[in-house]
Image (cartoon, rainbow, N blue to C red):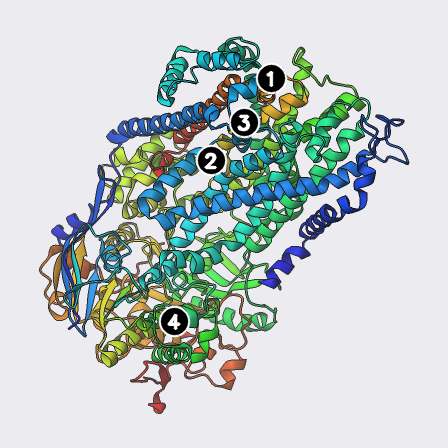
Amino acid sequence: MSELRFDDVTVRYGTARRPFTAVDGVSLTVPEGQVVGLVGESGSGKSTLARAAVGLAPLHSGEILLGGQPVPRRGRVRPLQMVFQDPFSSLDPRMTIGESITEPMPPGPGRAERRAEVERLLTLVHLDPDVAGALPGRLSGGQRQRAALARALAGQPKVVIADEITSALDVSIQGAVLNLVRELQRELGLSMLFISHNLAVVRYVASHVAVMYQGRIVEQGPVSEVLVDPQHAYTRELLAAVPGSRPPTHARPARSTS
Amino acid sequence: MSRRWLRVVRTPLGLTTGLLVTAVLVLAIVAPMLWSDRAEVIDTDHILTGPSGDHWAGTDSLGRDIFFRALVATRLSMELALAATVIGVVVGLVLGSAPLLLGRRLGRLVTAGVNIAVAFPGLLLALFFAVIFGVGATGAVLAIGMASAPSFARLVHTLVAGVAALDYVSAARVAGVGRVRVLLRHVLPNIAEPLVVNATISAGGSLLAFAGLSFLGLGVQAPSYDWGRLLFEGIGMIYVNPAAALAPGLAVLVAGLAFNLFGESVAKGLGVSTVGGRLTVTDEDAASAPALSAGGTDEHALDGSPSDLVLDVQDLRVSFPGPAGPIRPVRGVSFSVRHGEALGVVGESGSGKSLTALAVAQLIEEPGRVDAARLQFRGADLREGPRAHRHLLGTSMAMVFQDPMTSFNPTRRMGGQLAEVAVHHQGMSRKQAMARAVDRLRAVRVPDPEKRATQYPHEFSGGMRQRAMIGMGVMGNPSLIIADEPTTALDVTVQQQVLDLLQAIRDEDDVALVLISHDVTVVGEVCDRVLVMYAGRIVEDLPADQLDGGAQHPYTRALVAAVPDMHTDLEQPLAVVPGRPVSPTDVIVGCPFAPRCPLADDHCRTVDPPLAPVEHGIKVACWHAGEPLGLDEETGELVEADAV
Amino acid sequence: MTTTASSVASTPPTVGRVSGVLSHRWVRFGIRRLGRLLMSLAVLVTASFLMIHLIPGDPVRGALGPTAPTALVEARREALGLNDPLFVQYWHYLQGLFTGDLGTSLTSQLPVADIVSQRLPATLTLAMLGFLVSVAVAVPLGVLMGVVTRRGRGRRSELAFTTTSVVLGTIPDFLIGVGLVYVFGVSLQWLPVAGNATADAYVLPVLALAIGPAAILSRIFRVEMVAVLEADFVRTARAKRLPSRSIYLGHALPNALTAGLTICGLLLGSLVAGTVLVENVFAWPGLGRTIVASILSKDYPVVQAIVLVYGVGVLLANTVVDVALALLDPRSMIAED
């Protein structure tokens, strides 16, 4: 089994004298084959938690386990992959899309196999395989984000962490990336930790949701429960703040003076 | 890549300095081979003579020809300068990339050391090292090399840190790529250009620094000679033969400047970002203008008397000069806002929605151009220029910008920034104005306004700053608030509070609002009426309650269906609009949405549809308005209904 | 919206501190800045102490020449304390610094402290005058050029200004000095070119020292001004419909100054060092001539002391600039670190 489990994870930054606790004793499980949404506002620690999982942030205490084993933070084989927010900075501008996708592939297969794998992955994310030879500068934001997803999948991950992957994209393109996430989950049985500040987006792609506030998880559970019957005051406030969740005010007639 | 370098060489400065650098390098190689003899022959009959036909720059105290000595000295001068540069670059590279390789703690130590060293000027470091390494050419090479290392290390460090913070480096590390490989494959290639450029500049600097040391007598020692040494010897006899000092001085100056300026112009050439895409100006915009104004005239007939309007805009156009003719991000926009009305403007990046707002507010500066058939705010014609109605605009039109972090002056206290408005436009004294500022801060629910007014912007949180920005807008008695993405930079919960605040102000004083946003749901919640913009045009103008279900334009319908809300059907894929949004630099023929539109036919692709009224108070610019659309169950792509 | 909810959200962790803490922040800034100064001083003192010991071979033998009798060299070494263990020497060196004892010159046998204090005023005057002249020229010029060439306007004046300032800023001060000597001293014979006996003798050295920094600084102030005029808060000021004077002088200028001030510090430092060369061009009786003469005659105690004095000058200049920066821009206090 390959569930991702955060066990009492704490991440601290700053000096010993002035420590700043970004993530404070978080326990969270991403079950196999499920998409778990992690919501919270900026500074709530959700991205730090993700970065800690892939070894980009130092772990102060606690454990991050993948299938019962600590997540490897060194070496060539990385069963935990991440997709970043900004597709304009997450691909090396000097590497072709194909080279970028090849990078996380586990060592072993030869050149031809790798090329075939790149083609397979590009087709999987609905990109033309010819894109492999292009530099990221030639791709649109949505295409880059698909390529970034393909790169993550190239590492043959057991779990993928998606950190605000739609918030830097134009509105008309977000839908395509969200559709892709759902499709990958359904067809490959991909497990995913899906981080977003947007509850409606999380509701659309995730089966479970965890709400993070000031470094702690204040509520978690199935989407159908948490978003319908929130228990924590902060979750209720988040829900109330979702645009379109309240009766619209435009019923108010525009008065005319003069 | 090569094209960018070509562009550098095409600039007059780049070309001249490039040729000079080449000439200096060639001279360094050939001069000693050709003229060593003439430079070193001692002629005791012609000691310390001035310039003549035989000796263009005169002779020195041993009767040697100074002109040829200056030419021959090119090689030694260049060799020493390049050697020093290499030392500086190598040591700088090692020190500068150390933090990435050594990890946090050791790296911080190296950085701290570099930071201390870099505070001392290069010449002082060079003197220090010159004492240690000893007087002479070798000592001076080491001294200048070591002295230039800290600043180079700082540069490398900054560049490395900049690239290392980018997501693609994180992605590589997540992919299991080792530190050294990350440095070699991802970091160094991406900083190579600035490094090479700075090494070139640094070579020029070394050349000049070397001349300085030799001039002080600390560098090259007789009988060897570089330019600095010649200058050192020449300055002693400047009254006898000024050319003896001027010739080597000129040589060092030309060579040093050549390297330096060549580096600078390369830096400028490579650094400058250019507007991509080509643009040819067509008459197509102008042709479609009458249709639009016609739509606008209708509006008056429908929506009431002009006196009821706060803002009346007809055929608004914004253009900027581009490399291939003007760029037109706003191409003929007409709308009006009634008293107390909330008008939403939605569109994606590049749709021209923000520029429309800035143009209306008269905040577009040269070289941007704003044209309009009519631009009236409370009856005043704004086309007369921003100065003409300064006080009216200052008190009656409030602006709220996207990023509250950068929209306040960081060096001035909050209260003063608010009070300023009242001092300038309402003739209040400073004290009165400050009292008003505190009162306004209270009105926008900033807690403890007396204390807050004395604080600086950075002491406010994002949401608090945006409230203060709104407070600044209500210093006068605004009849219109223009808010450009006022909540995009804020957290969801804070976003709601700011929207509530805007709502409360509108309710209180019957203020009209123009809310610009990329978020259809936000606009749908707050506004009475919505304008949908695409490619610098209004493609649909509809009541907000028609957004969900009543929209006629395929783009509006796609936009609504592409964004999930809390009621989205989980069984259906989200709508996908193929292709990418139009950029202001793109050439547009026909309907700008046609390339992405499932309903488009040849007519759409050739003739731009005008904005025309249909039913339910909706105006739409589409030849196929309201025709049924289906959703491909597999991909979510919008298709013609009968194709499903 | 529920009351609990709004109370949660209105106190995010990053809410600005109340102004009562403002003074604390100044104290914290003062302590940190002082700490950095002391740290740099420690590095400087140690480096100047180690300088003698890093020289390959015996510095005393080097200074006295290969023909000097061994006994004399040994006696000198003993007198200088060079035979003591290193840390003892370091301790004595520090003690000396605190009591104003900088050692004795190897060549003239005079106390180094006397030599330094005798030469320091001339150098200090030169550096300060150079700095004042360059700032007085650079700030108005740069700001004016910034306003004139904002948002891609006045392309020609921008090109002319940038090219001139780059060229002038690149020419080292001693070459400018040589040029000035030739034009005003040798050809026109308008101004004296050596010493500091008369007031007009100051003109050329100060010019030689100030032209380069003035060019660099005015270019920086122009760039800063252009950048500041693009800033969001200037757009806000324009949205407030303030008069141009108030936008340029009230909003843009302070921010442009703040940004340029950092460079001022570095420039002041290099100006101090620049005096070494300029003094040697104009036979200026300051530290710069003395240090070069001492390096050539291997009079290491003098060299050591003057390096220290220059270093302290540079550090003090940087500190003054940082404090000025903190006064102008309150963010810079926290931005560090």
Classify 10 Å Cα crowding around label 4: few (below 14), some (14-19), many (20 and above): many
Please report, as a chain letter, where disc 4 is located.
A
The amino acid marked with disc number 3 is: Val
Q: Secondary structure at mark 3?
A: helix
Quarter that holds the N terminus of chain B? bottom right
Of labels 3 and 4, the one closer to you: 3
Label 3, on which residue? B131
- Asked whether the beta carbons under mark 4 and mark 1 sit within 8 Å of each other, the answer is no
Question: On residue A102, which mark appears?
Answer: 4
The amino acid marked with disc number 1 is: Thr
Q: Secondary structure at mark 1?
A: loop
Quarter that holds the C terminus of chain B? bottom left
Classify 10 Å Cα crowding around label 2: few (below 14), some (14-19), many (20 and above): many
Give the side of residue B10 with respect to residue C40, left or right: right
The answer to whether one can see residue C226 in this image is: no
Task: Give the vertical position of B638 relative to A255 (above or below).
Answer: below
- Asked whether the beta carbons under mark 3 and mark 4 sit within 8 Å of each other, the answer is no
Respond whether the residues carrying marks 3 and 4 are from the same subunit.
no
Label 1, on which residue? C67
